[in-house]
Amino acid sequence: MTGSLVIRTALPAEATEVAALHLRARSTYYPDGLPDDGLDWEARWREAIERPDGQVLCAVRDGGLAGIASFRSPEGGAADAVKLFQFHVDPDRWRTGVGTALHPPAEGDHHLCLRFSVPGE
């Protein structure tokens, strides 16, 4: 770990960098390469950043994005609940405390709803 870590709101102008981090992180989960889902992730991230009912936080260290978290109020959910949609840490920053530092600000004063699936269940 080197420089200090800053957690802040992502800016629309950072959508390209956010999408690149997303791609790097997800690519590590697939040993045969990331499947092409046909989505324009840069546009999707820009939309997420600009959503009035959600937020994208980024962790910045040494002038570059180290992690991202995207969350918003779930449709029909309690007013004090947020749903975490994306949470990624740059693979070069794994095990450096980025995810640990990014998680509490994403949860904030809300009840955090996680969405995940377990293969075979």
Image (cartoon, rainbow, N blue to C red):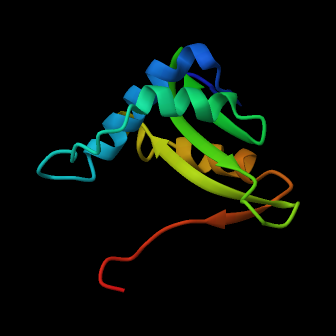
Q: Quadrant of residue 27?
A: top left
Residue 82 x, y percent position in the rendering: 74, 57
Q: Is residue 37 above or below residue 52?
A: below
Camera sees residue 62: no
> Which quadrant is home to the C terminus?
bottom left
Q: Residue at x 61, y 35 (%)?
A: 48
Residue 93 x, y percent position in the rendering: 42, 36
Q: Residue at x 68, y 28 (%)?
A: 50
The answer to whether 16 appears left or right of 73 in the picture is left
Numbered marks: total: 0
Q: Is residue 9 above or below residue 68?
A: above
Q: Is residue 54 above or below residue 111?
A: above
Q: Nearer the viewer, residue 65 or 72?
A: 72
Q: Residue at x 74, y 45 (%)?
A: 105
Q: Is residue 105 above or below residue 80?
A: above
Q: Quadrant of residue 107?
A: bottom right
Q: Nearer the viewer, residue 112 or 89?
A: 112
Q: Nearer the viewer, residue 120 or 43?
A: 43
The answer to whether 21 appears left or right of 55 in the picture is left
Q: Residue at x 55, y 66 (%)?
A: 115
Residue 13 x, y percent position in the rendering: 58, 13
The answer to whether 47 appears left or right of 52 in the picture is left
Residue 46 x, y percent position in the rendering: 56, 26
The answer to whether 80 appears left or right of 115 in the picture is right
- Residue farthest toward the left in the current orientation of the protein: 32
